Amino acid sequence: MQKATEIYKERGWKISDKSATQPYDLLAIKDKQRKFIEVKGTTGDGKSVLLTHGEVKHANDHPNESVIIIIGRIELEKSKDVWLGLNGEIMSIEDPWHIDQKDLKATQFRYSI
């Protein structure tokens, strides 16, 4: 999320971390505009990422204000029993982020009894 924050701060946006309470990671504000930024990190090439139901719903509800940033090739290092993500490359920035339903693939189902 640090790389995404730096990108948008350089573009003049004020950034707030909302990852603990919202279905997006960062809220960017500039003048009267806002952007909901979802950041996905992977150790792979970033060709696909996992999205939650809430992330997809929020992006679909706010198609012109949503952004997704994919950070790939992240290196993992363990320090004092905590995994740290290091380096990484920006693989993709979709701004605005319009989700095409054909690009979504179900990977889990909830079964109720």
Image: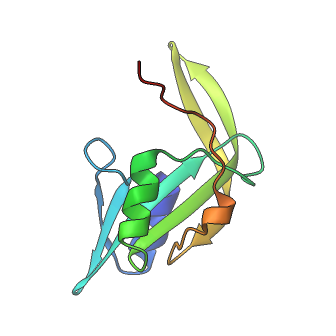
Q: Which residue, as the protein is rendered here, is positioned at the far bottom?
A: 31
Q: Position of residue 52 (x, y in %)?
A: 47, 44
Which residue corresponds to the image point at 40% horizontal and 58% vertical from the top-left?
A: 57
User: Which sits in the foreground, 22 or 4?
Assistant: 22
User: Which sits in the foreground, 51 or 76?
Assistant: 51
Q: Is residue 30 above or below residue 55?
A: below
Q: Position of residue 46 (x, y in %)?
A: 72, 52
User: Which sits in the foreground, 81 or 106?
Assistant: 106
Q: Position of residue 18 (x, y in %)?
A: 28, 51
Q: Is residue 20 visible?
A: yes
Residue 64 sits in quarter: bottom left
Q: Which residue, as the protein is rendered here, is positioned at the far top?
A: 81
Which residue corresponds to the image point at 51% horizontal and 12% vertical from the top-left?
A: 81
Q: Which residue, as the protein is rendered here, is positioned at the far left?
A: 32
Query: Which quarter of the rendered picture does the C terminus lie within?
Result: top left
Q: Is residue 91 visible?
A: no
